[in-house]
Amino acid sequence: MKTLTNATHDPSLKSWVASANSGATDFPIQNLPYGRFRRAGVDEPWRIGVAIGDQVLDLHLAYRQAPWADEVRPLLEPLAAGDLHAFMALGAPAWHVLRAALSAALAEGSEQAPFLELCLLPQLQCEMSLPCRIGDYTDFYSGIHHATTIGKLFRPDNPLLPNYKWVPIGYHGRASSIGLGGTVKRPQGQTRAPDAAAPGFGPCQKLDYELEVGAFVGRANALGEPVPMDQAEDALFGLVLLNDWSARDIQAWEYQPLGPFLSKSFASSISPWIVTMEALAPFRRPFTRPAGDPQPLPYLDSGFNRAAGAIDMILEVWLQTAAMLDAGQPAVRLSQSNLTDAYWTWAQMLVHHASNGCNLQVGDLLGSGTLSGPKEGTYASLMELSANGRQPITLPGGEIRAFLQDGDTVTLRAFCAAAGAVRIGLGEVSGTIAG
Ligand code: MN
């Protein structure tokens, strides 16, 4: 197995940007995620930046104002032009070279520091946009504990359908309604109450969130040419948080026989910083199957995937209601789970997606599916937490919730921590429900 980590992951590495060395930031020098930003309130072109501590390194300025090695300049060029898509299309070797260059440039003692100091902007003064154009969006269902808990609500004796442990389940989502959160409008839709003779149309009454991780595809495959497992890792650029907002009452009525449709397409929210797969190297873990479960079919199997296909990432959901906000009460954590609970790895999901010849494109987004754990405290949707509304949860201030109310703010967070590595985070994505 190739060595995954390199000098950019060295835990002793410090940055001349002081806030990157705090130990608490999501964005130490070992992370270096990409995002698209501009100065808040200023109508100027969007730029690509790298988050470092509580600052953003403006790559438009950095390209012009600092000296860079000859092999680095062409890699920075598309980023300086505000085009993350074009940079991703340069491929994994380019991603690797630029990460090394940015790490060296931002490290203590860097000769570029005096130039790059002038290219920083506090994140608090930034407005973020989607990091790149998202071509297609596919949402998988890799959270086996979520699938089991939801399945039990409807089929207590047979929660997992027979295909689950063999084929990565997914559906084609809607790319145009993906945003960064903020205000999320409660959808209207067609629903039918269990005892009603006919459906009606109106505001969703069972609005839910789904805690997921999203992966940006960084390499295209031609139509008709599947991606083998040994090329899958190089086709994955990086990860973001993903909230797959879900209208459970609309979903229950519409989803058979073709799957989710308008119950999902009204909004999905991602976090603004793409944490690269290379940054996640120290947190890779073996991919294993519980004893007695089938092993993946050969096209979804590889030595590398078995040795390091999984990623150890802590995932959290936080809720603050309008009443809590008014009373000065902080958000409460509803769940904490881990990406290692996914039943399929990113490589397997990507390979399966392309296995019929489907052409994935740079900038496509893959969703993991809801990442719940197996026990209380790890349920990553309200549908699980409240048993589809039958057992509402009580919040610290005494309010109860079966599903989301107007004014509720849902925040997803994620971070990776491991012995011998500096903690890195994905940042957060937050959305507030409006009626
Ligand atoms: Mn989902």
Image (cartoon, helix red, strand yellow):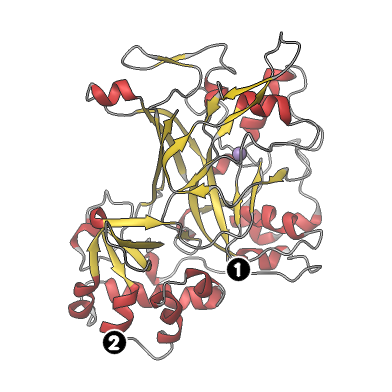
The three-letter code of the residue at mark 2 reads Pro
Q: Which one is in front in this view, the residue at disc 1 or the one at disc 2?
A: 2
The answer to whether the residues at label 1 and label 2 have Cβ atoms under 8 Å apart is: no
User: Quarter of the image holding residue 420?
Assistant: bottom left
Q: Is 348 above or below relative to 261?
A: below
Seen in the picture, residue 100 relative to 194 is either above or below; the reply is below
Farthest residue, direction top: 195
Q: Is residue 253 visible?
A: yes
Viewport quadrant of the C terminus:
top left
Q: Is the CB of the residue bearing disc 1 within 8 angstroms of ligand 1?
A: no
Asked whether, in this view, residue 299 is left or right of residue 70, the answer is right
The amino acid type found where label 1 is placed reads Asp
The residue that mark 2 highlights is 67
Residue that appears at 25% across and 65% down:
14
Q: Estimate the x, y position of residue 320 in percent, counting from the top left.
A: 35, 28
- Ligand 1 rendered quadrant: top right
State the residue at coordinates (56%, 43%): 340
Q: Residue furthest bottom?
A: 70
Please, what secondary structure does the residue beneath circle 2 have?
Answer: loop
Image disc number at residue 234:
1
At x 50% / y 74%, what residue is drawn? 87
Within 10 Å of disc 1 (Cα), the crowding (few <14, some 14-19, many 20+) is some
x and y percent of residue 85 in the render? 52, 69
Q: Is mark 2 within 8 Å of ligand 1?
A: no
Classify residue 373 by image quadrant: top right
Q: Secondary structure at mark 1?
A: helix
